[in-house]
Image (cartoon, rainbow, N blue to C red):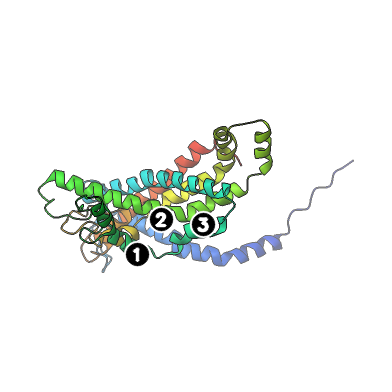
């Protein structure tokens, strides 16, 4: 008996699908692919003049120069702090809050809405509020410390730190603490909702079987909740890491356009995106745009590498 070959999909269907996708392809090519390719090319243009488009030659000198720039190295350090310290801590806090909300049936919707508020709050406005909380003179935190007889702390100050490494380190650590507190508060918003949604999607039969077996809550968390929540954890970690690597507005709101406390001229709290925008602000200067492009390429490579490593090392631990 001769089997008939299945008829392939008509060519007209395929053409129709590509026609419908064409506007998306055009927009992606115009606003994603072309800017990315042009940025990579510009990063290799030595002595590039943005206004005229002239450059001396193609060279990798800008990459060498950028890695010898102390401001760029400081930006890398601050960005890594946000990506590898703030993100895991905010994820642990958000997961704990989501577990508590999932266990509590009363006022769950109200509390979830309250935790989501930072997501719809203007970043600049929230940063100004935190700047007021940690204000050196009339900040809320110093006022609370005063109730306990503790002297006010100069949280955001850069006075006298230029020639004193010890004072600079103290000021830098205080600024990191402020940035950490802001990241914890801001990180709760979307993460709690995502974790809560993931917890709601777990089949309750697993928990019923565990209760019948007399399994402890800690073992249920390790053997049931976390493995079944692993896709959500991976998604939250990747998106949060990418967001942390692109941090800019929060730092500006907390520390101003100088990326540091008043009196500091070293751009203490600058991030990679802040470094790129700072260089683009000097676009009239020869080579400034190429330096910004090189920093953007490095940021893109870092995000791609981080995402790839996360997917590689977690593929066996994620249960779909």
| Disc nearer the start of the sequence (3/2) | 3
Q: Position of residue 245 (x, y in %)?
A: 37, 51
Q: Which mark is residue 186?
A: 2
Which secondary structure lies at badge 3? helix
Horizontally, residue 113 falls left or right of residue 137, namely right
Label 3 belongs to which residue? 111
Q: Could you classify mark 3 by the number of other residues whose Cα lies within 10 Å: few (under 14), some (14-19), or many (20 or more)?
A: few
Is residue 277 visible from the viewing direction of this image?
A: no
| Disc nearer the start of the sequence (2/1) | 1
Tell which tag, 3 or 1, sits nearer the viewer.
3
Which secondary structure lies at badge 1? helix
Q: How many numbered circles are shown? A: 3
User: Furthest residue to the left?
Assistant: 163
Label 1 belongs to which residue? 124
Q: Position of residue 89 (x, y in %)?
A: 40, 44
Task: Determine the image quadrant of residue 15.
Answer: bottom right
Viewer-proximal residue, 178 or 103? 103
Q: Could you classify mark 2 by the number of other residues whose Cα lies within 10 Å: few (under 14), some (14-19), or many (20 or more)?
A: many
Q: Which mark is residue 199?
A: none
């Amino acid at each position: 008996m001769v089997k008939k070959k299945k008829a392939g999909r008509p060519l007209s269907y395929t053409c129709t699908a590509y026609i419908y996708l064409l506007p998306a392809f055009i927009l992606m090519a115009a606003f994603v692919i072309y800017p990315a390719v042009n940025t990579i090319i510009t990063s290799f243009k030595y002595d590039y003049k943005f206004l005229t488009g002239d450059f001396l030659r193609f060279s990798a000198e800008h990459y060498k120069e950028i890695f010898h720039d102390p401001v760029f190295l400081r930006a890398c350090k601050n960005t890594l702090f946000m990506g590898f310290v703030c993100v895991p801590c905010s994820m642990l806090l958000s997961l704990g809050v989501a577990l508590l909300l999932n266990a509590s049936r009363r006022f769950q919707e109200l509390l979830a809405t309250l935790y989501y508020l930072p997501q719809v709050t203007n970043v600049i406005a929230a940063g100004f509020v935190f700047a007021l909380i940690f204000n050196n003179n009339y900040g809320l935190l110093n006022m609370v410390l005063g109730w306990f007889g503790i002297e006010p702390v100069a949280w955001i100050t850069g006075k006298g730190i230029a020639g004193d490494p010890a004072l600079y380190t103290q000021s830098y650590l205080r600024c990191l603490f402020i940035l950490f507190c802001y990241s914890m508060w801001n990180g709760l918003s979307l993460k709690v909702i995502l974790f809560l949604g993931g917890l709601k999607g777990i089949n309750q039969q697993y928990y019923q079987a565990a209760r019948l077996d007399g399994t402890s809550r800690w073992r249920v968390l390790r053997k049931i909740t976390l493995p079944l929540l692993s896709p959500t954890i991976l998604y939250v970690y990747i998106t949060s890491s990418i967001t942390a690597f692109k941090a800019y507005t929060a730092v500006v709101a907390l520390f101003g356009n100088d990326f540091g406390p008043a009196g500091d001229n070293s751009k203490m709290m600058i991030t990679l995106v802040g470094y790129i925008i700072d260089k683009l602000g000097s676009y009239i200067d020869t080579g400034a745009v190429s330096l910004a492009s090189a920093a953007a390429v490095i940021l893109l490579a870092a995000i791609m590498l981080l995402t790839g490593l996360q997917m590689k090392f977690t593929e066996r631990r994620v249960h779909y």
